[in-house]
Image (tube, helix red, strand yellow):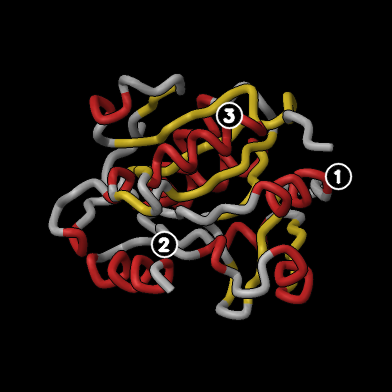
Amino acid sequence: MNQRCDTMTGIILSGGKNLRMGGKNKAFVSVDGAFIIDRVVNLFQDVFDEIIVSTNTPLDYIDYDVHIVTDIVKNKAAIGGIYTGLLYASSDHCFVAACDMPFLDRRFIEHMIARIGTYDIVVPESSSGLQPLHAIYSKKCLPYMKKLIDGDRLKIRPLFKHFKTLTIPSEVIKTFDPDERMFLNINSPEDLDKVRMERSF
């Protein structure tokens, strides 16, 4: 039976420049007749009591029942958005996902939440590698994140070695999603065309 998680915040990252999409906000690309952001927000509303959208275009999201925040430290890539979301969150742990992931799997997100225990980070390791933009982070990460940001070191992966991290292997991921489509990002018109073509068969 699905249950809402009132001990964790859901953070949606929407801070990219969308260059490969020609400047169009990827969150508002339509997949299966719905904007990706609608798909993500609807799923998050079923799971989390608190939802934060970390974005540099806040006016795009004023019609959504979410807490909108903008980067505290500008132009620091995804780690800057995660840092801002964590700082504003009321929960000690937050699930983070990108705004351009149309095929998130609720059951797998709930599996990740159930595994948090005493870990600071829970991150899937799919067949293509670690998935830092589909992961759970603790507020304990904030000081080290700030240190990385201040040093203009914008890679997320150093966090995984610095904190108590649980990686969920591909074998487990595939029991939820055999093709690991939950991690698919729509970054370009070509990505979108490929998805639409696959869905038409």
Instruction: Describe the element under mark 3 as helix, strand or loop.
Output: helix
Residue to which mark 3 is pinned:
45
Give the Cα distance between marks 1 and 3: 23 Å
Instruction: Describe the element under mark 2 as helix, strand or loop.
Output: loop
Image: 7 above or below 14: above
Q: Residue at x 25, y 30 (%)?
A: 60
Q: Which mark is residue 117?
A: 1
Image: 46 above or below 132: above
Q: Which mark is residue 178?
A: none
Relative side of 95 to 34, left or right = right
Q: Quadrant of the N terminus?
A: top right
Amino acid type for the residue under numbered disc 2: Asn
Q: Nearer the viewer, residue 182 or 8?
A: 182
Residue to which mark 2 is pinned:
185
Q: Nearer the viewer, residue 193 or 76?
A: 193
In the image, which is nearer the foreground, mark 1 or mark 2? Answer: 2
Figure quadrant of residue 124? bottom right
Q: Residue at x 73, y 24 (%)?
A: 6
Q: Quadrant of the C terminus?
A: bottom left
